[in-house]
């Protein structure tokens, strides 16, 4: 049975370390810490590889371990991030890594959506199945 959990998150820290910056294209490693509120409660750490290019184009990939409670079940899982943006298009996927669920979240599978609200807040939606 598919379930949906929604909530918000705060970015507690953002540590971006550029490692290649030339000709208007910057590549960086970024460590991010978050706190989640709502039907998903907990914390996470993410390691992201990011690139910013001219005209507002950008992309990133990363892994994020979320240690949380989802609908009363406690455990953790890893979320794979993959996003690309240009001046005219954008796409992003946030997928639960298979078999990464622990504790009461063992067997978790599905995907997330992240929405940045007009006020700058972040909404997190997790569509999931749990064995």
Image (spheres, helix red, strand yellow):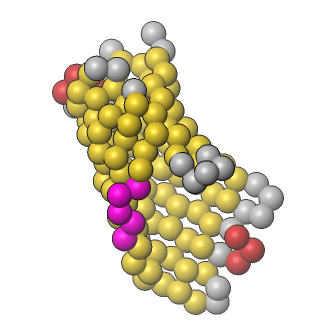
Q: In this view, does 55 lie above or below 90?
A: below
The image shows residue 56 at horizontal and vertical percentages of 70, 70
Q: In this view, does 97 lie to the left or right of 51?
A: left
Q: The magenta stretch spans which residues?
A: 11-15
The image shows residue 68 at horizontal and vertical percentages of 28, 35
Q: Which residue is drawn at 45% across and 66% down?
A: 49
Q: In this view, does 22 lie to the left or right of 7?
A: right
Extreme residue in the left direction:
103
Which image quadrant for residue 74? top left
Residue 50 part of the magenta-drawn span: no
Which image quadrant for residue 38? top left
Q: Is residue 29 above or below residue 24?
A: above
Q: In this view, does 124 lie above or below 110?
A: below
- Quarter that holds the C terminus: top left
Residue 13 part of the magenta-drawn span: yes
Please name whichever residue, 120 or 52, is drawn nearer the observer in this view of the structure. 120
The image shows residue 88 at horizontal and vertical percentages of 80, 58
| Residue 34 appears in the rendering | yes
């Amino acid at each position: 049975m598919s379930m949906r959990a929604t909530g918000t998150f705060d970015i507690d820290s953002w540590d971006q370390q550029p490692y290649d910056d030339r000709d208007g294209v910057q590549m960086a490693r970024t460590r991010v810490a978050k706190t989640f509120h709502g039907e998903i409660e907990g914390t996470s750490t993410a390691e992201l590889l990011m690139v910013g290019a001219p005209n507002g184009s950008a992309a990133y990939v990363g892994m994020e371990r979320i240690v949380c409670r989802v609908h009363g079940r406690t455990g953790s899982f890893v979320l794979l991030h993959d996003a690309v943006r240009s001046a005219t298009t954008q796409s992003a996927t946030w997928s639960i890594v298979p078999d990464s669920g622990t504790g009461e979240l063992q067997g978790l599978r599905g995907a997330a959506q992240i929405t940045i609200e007009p006020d700058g807040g972040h909404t997190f939606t997790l569509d999931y199945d749990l064995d």
